[in-house]
Amino acid sequence: MRKIFVSFLAAAFFYSAAAADVAVTVYNSGKSMVRETREIVLKKGLQTLEFDEVASQIDATSVLPKFLNDNANIKVLEQNFDYDLVGRDKLLSKYIGKKIEIERIGEDKRGKLKGTLLSVSGGLVVKTDDKIVLAPAGEVSLSEMPEGLRLKPTLTWLVSSGFEGKNAMEVSYQTFGLSWSADYVLVTDEKDTQADIVGWVTINNKSGATYKNANIKVIAGDVNIVSLNGNAELKGVRKAKMVYDAAPAPASFSEKSFDEYHIYELQRKSTVKDNEVKQIEFITASQVDVKKVLKFNALKNNKITVNLEFKNSKENNLGVPLPKGRARVFKYDGASLEFVGEDNIDHTANNAKLSIYTGNAFDVTGERRQIERKQTSSKTVEESYKITLKNAKKEEVEVIVEENFDRWALNWQISENSAKYEKTNSTTAEFKIKVPADGEAVLTYKVKYSWK
């Protein structure tokens, strides 16, 4: 149970808090918001409040305390974050210049060694009455706990209160080391026309605290975070264990717009342990219409790319804003489920189209060659291209040839083209080319650049 300790002047007193009300809002950026409410007891006058078991990676400049009863009559005079925690090296460093006792080990070194600790760097150095002993082996005994050390990270406040009695204290703060991402699993049918989709919220907690029975929200969007004095680098490197927390149907997260972002709120409380990766299902969709698209853009990739495309719409059994994350695609080979590729997707709004790049085609290849280039005037240039597509498959395929014209010219115009094209934007044209089974197809065109 988490505690708030309250001391009145020189008198020591502590109050065991009731179970805390905990809420955690996790951002993609790695800096998250924590809000805890705990019961306390106050007396009139000057006193110190201690709020333990907070995140060790807390941003101390973000802490905001609030008393829920008679807040205007309670003044916070000082606020501190104490993170000097108990540990072997820390304890010993506090005893430099003081007496210690070592229970010696080894057949010829039984007994106790008593002396003054001179150093702990590279091993203990102890001065006895008649000599200095380097790196003595044994169990070290210390007489008492040094002042200033904490068992757990603790927030403390110096408070002047005109209120007396039970109260509730709400503390909000930001912390590093707590982040989330979205992970998607797509399973397509044999013809790549439909897919089942499962989306997971993956929460990674390396903040140094456990959030028990917490209300959890995650926010999708690119929130700007400013790093001050390197605080953003406080993230500890620890081993995380995987916990797969299967959420019950129906969908366990609700979604709503907030400012320029989207909030996904878990519809039940959950515990996020320190040093844990937790996955919670947030979206499921079946029979989503998809299409496998082959694309060739020789200026970006000399291979033909394989892409899985679909629309994020209600009519397509989706229609929920999808946070950015990693999408893995699987497919049955007739007997078992096999992995076919993965890609990172960006935040995708409702009714937007989504394309997942899964890899490069093996049996379909492309080659692009410039046939001719000539300057027809001081302000015009003409170029001719030949693109050859080869298909080693036993069935016909369609390849979208994407050509970019985003160079120095103000205007460009295609002519003498062997296939129709669509101008998809001011710098791009797309040709849809059918390539026969065990055959090839050739696209030729001329482009004229002009400028003022």
Image (spheres, grey):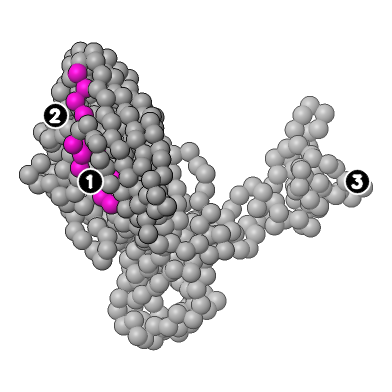
The CA span between labels 3 and 2 is 83 Å
Q: Please, is residue 305 above or below residue 177 in the view?
A: above
Q: Secondary structure at mark 1?
A: strand
The CA span between labels 1 and 2 is 26 Å
Q: Amino acid at mark 2?
A: Thr
> What residue range appears in magenta?
420-436
Q: Which residue is mark 3?
A: 131
Q: Amino acid at mark 1?
A: Lys
> Toward which corner of the image does residue 393 lie, by quadrant?
top left
The foreground one among 50 and 352 is 352
Q: Please, is residue 232 above or below residue 297 in the view?
A: below
Specify whether residue 245 is painted magenta.
no
Q: Amino acid at mark 3?
A: Lys
Q: Residues within 10 Å of mark 1 (few under 14, many from 20)?
A: few
Q: Are marks 1 and 2 in contact (CB under 8 Å)?
A: no
Name the side, left or right, on which 310 lies relative to 137. left
Is any part of residue 406 visible from this angle?
no
Residue 379 screen position, x and y as percent: 39, 53
Q: Earlier in the sequence, mark 1 or mark 3?
A: 3
Q: Secondary structure at mark 3?
A: loop
Residue at screen point 12% across, 46% down = 313
Q: Which residue is mark 2?
A: 193
Q: Quadrant of the C terminus?
A: bottom left
Q: Foreground mark, 1 or 2?
A: 1
The CA span between labels 1 and 3 is 89 Å
User: Which mark is on residue 4?
Assistant: none
Residue 87 screen position, x and y as percent: 61, 49
Name the side, left or right, on which 139 lies relative to 255. right
Specify whether residue 430 is painted magenta.
yes
User: Which mark is on residue 423?
Assistant: 1
